Image (cartoon, helix red, strand yellow):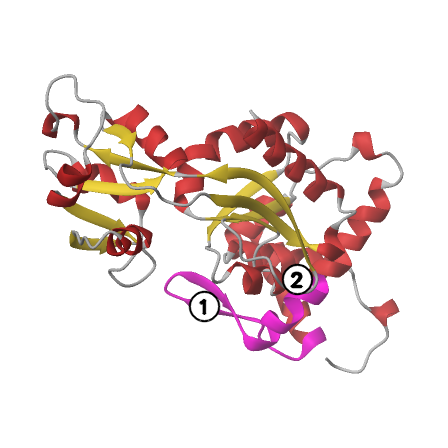
Amino acid sequence: MNCMNIIDVDLNLLKVFEALYEEASASRAALRLGVTQSAVSAALRRLRDVYGDSLFVRTGRGLAPTLRANQLRPLISDALGKCRQSLALLDPAANDYTGRAVSLGLSDDFEIAFGRRLIDAVQQRAPNLRLIFRQTHSQIVADALLERSIDLAITAGGFNARMLSREILAEGGYSCLLDASSLAPGQVVLSLDEFVSREHILISSGGFIGIVDEALAALGLTRRVSVSTTHFAALPYLLRGTGAVATIPGHAAEEIARVTGLVALPCPLPLPHYPIELGWRTTTQVDPALLRVRDAITDCFRR
């Protein structure tokens, strides 16, 4: 940063930095801030002078942050967060969240099962606050929170790191998702033999071995996995019209079955349950916006 006194810096530039970082577009940042695109471009020129760096470079997908911008992001985010917290002390009930966004990390099974309910619950508590859903999972969630690429996260664990807090929301289990036309009339359960004999589709962040394979191995059995994919949302297209089966978290299986005409059945294997947890940076405990979203998430899972 160039040598200058904070008295010479317009602190509103920090809001422009935040909007540019999160929107990756000068036009979208302008809409978010309620100003013209030329005003955002002028503010970016001033930011570049202040920090002695281009901060954002144009790519085919919009504006990408430079290394310096990535270094500045957590510092500026904390500074703005503390300003917002101080204003909330005046009258927390009257806090206006216009232009404020909270990024929530979650895998698409949680987004499918709870996304709409979360949107509705947050809008009731903070009508002008916007949610950003970002893909994450338990193996990377701690780093994402600590690097401030997300504010909150819902995963099956992964919060065992210093400076992170967590709350258990529920206990998860597994169900089998398949095309109803592949079942006998009135069939509501799968036998273990039929389960093993079917083609299997695996949802995994990598590889072809999952919790089902471990449980089958303990019984001296194996299954045939024809494909592994990272997206739960692809399952209706991969299962419809086939005899294949996908063993996935029960909350996602029930919601996908409800809207697609597929059917969710109990898994014939005894699979372990797992905790569904909400995690956040401990330093954000008093941020009123995050508290509102955390309360909304907790209520959704309790219902």
The picture places residue 142, in percent across and down from the top left corner, at 57, 61
Give the position of the N terminus as an image quadrant.
bottom right
Image vertical order of residue 110 relative to residue 135, above or below: above
Image vertical order of residue 130 relative to residue 14, above or below: above
Classed neighbour count for the residue bearing mark 2: other residues with Cα under 10 Å, few (<14), some (14–19), many (≥20): some
Checking the image for residue 58, the label placed there is 1
The residue lying at 76 percent from left, 49 percent from top is 285
The picture places residue 269, in percent across and down from the top left corner, at 29, 41
The residue lying at 81 percent from left, 52 percent from top is 83
Was residue 141 drawn as part of the magenta stretch in this picture?
Answer: no
Label 2 belongs to which residue?
Answer: 43
Was residue 68 drawn as part of the magenta stretch in this picture?
Answer: yes
Looking at the rendered image, the disc whose residue lies closer to the viewer, 1 or 2, is: 1
The picture places residue 88, in percent across and down from the top left corner, at 83, 41
Relative to 262, 16 lies left or right? right
Give the position of the C terminus as an image quadrant.
top right
Residue 297 falls in image quadrant:
top right
In front here: 56 or 265?
A: 265
- The secondary element bearing badge 1 is classed as strand
Residue type at mark 2: give it.
Ala
Magenta range is 50-76
Whether pointer 1 and pointer 2 mark residues with C-beta atoms closer than 8 Å, the reply is no
Classed neighbour count for the residue bearing mark 1: other residues with Cα under 10 Å, few (<14), some (14–19), many (≥20): few
